[in-house]
Amino acid sequence: GDSVTQMEGPVTLSEEAFLTINCTYTATGYPSLFWYVQYPGEGLQLLLKATKADDKGSNKGFEATYRKETTSFHLEKGSVQVSDSAVYFCALSEWYTGNQFYFGTGTSLTVIP
Amino acid sequence: DVKVTQSSRYLVKRTGEKVFLECVQDMDHENMFWYRQDPGLGLRLIYFSYDVKMKEKGDIPEGYSVSREKKERFSLILESASTNQTSMYLCASMERRNTQYFGPGTRLTVL
């Protein structure tokens, strides 16, 4: 079945450091891929998405490229800020599974000044 | 912007009580979902609905039921709350083949 595996946390970085959070997926067909972010005490917000191979999603300085050959969708940011401290979830969706989403377990990021 | 609201941010109930969690979306989305979120386990799907009066079981439906009488409202019901149902509950809505939009969550504590 479909699934998402993402990097275990927690991750702690200094401000302005480079961020990578790894995400790989297993899917039968051609899924759409997503990154969501959850700030403390809040629900999940869409950060970025990509719907087909080689697409790059980007938002707020974050980027992720849909790599079909490596079944990956790694999240990157060149220079993190304290305000980026949150939990990040990778997810996939395939239409034929009834629009269900499959989420990774989340990666907690803390950015220190 | 899509808005998904949940009836309570924090809720404390006693074992055996019947608990209702309400979710409302304002974008006429067909699909709605209930998840629970627990540390180390990520999000687990409880139930989802793709239309009024339609429902499908997710991965962990035991101990829960749902109701969708109107398109904008999706209710999660804990028939007899137990301590192992203490969790964060997240509601989401989605258009067909599109992005899921989440509410702020309800943190339920069962004593």
Image (cartoon, grey):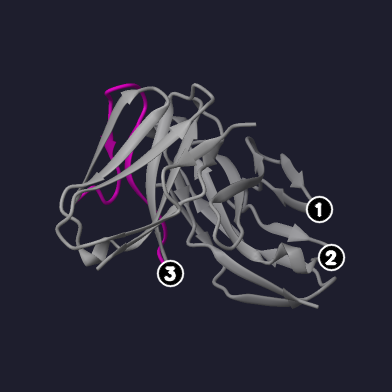
Q: Is residue B33 visible?
A: yes
Q: CA distance from mark 2 to mark 1?
A: 8 Å
Q: Could you give the CA–CA distance between mark 3 and mark 1, rounded to whole angstroms?
A: 27 Å
Q: Residue B105 appears at what percent x and percent y?
A: 46, 51
Q: Which numbered tag is attached to residue B87?
A: none
Q: Is residue A78 left or right of residue A21?
A: right
Residue A85, given in percent of the width and then of the height, sits at 68, 67
**B81 drawn magenta:** no
Mark 3 → mark 2, Cα distance in angstroms: 27 Å
Q: Are marks 2 and 1 on the same chain?
A: yes
Residue B40 marker: 3
Q: Nearer the viewer, residue A57 or B69?
A: B69
Q: Is residue B110 left or right of residue B95?
A: left
Q: Residue B70's quadrant in the figure?
A: top left
Q: Which residues are magenta?
A: B41-62
Say which element carries label 2: loop
Residue designated by label 2: A79
Question: Which mark sits nearer the N-terminus, 2 or 1?
Answer: 1
Residue at 79%, 50% (x, y): give it: A60
Q: Name the chain letter of the residue that bears numbered label 3.
A: B
Q: Residue at x 24, y 65 (%)?
A: B84
Q: Amino acid at mark 2?
A: Ser
Rendered position, A9 above or below A21: below
Residue A31 appears in view: no
Depicted A81 relative to depicted A101: above or below: below
Callout 3 amino acid = Gly
Q: Which residue lies under the disc numbered 1?
A: A61
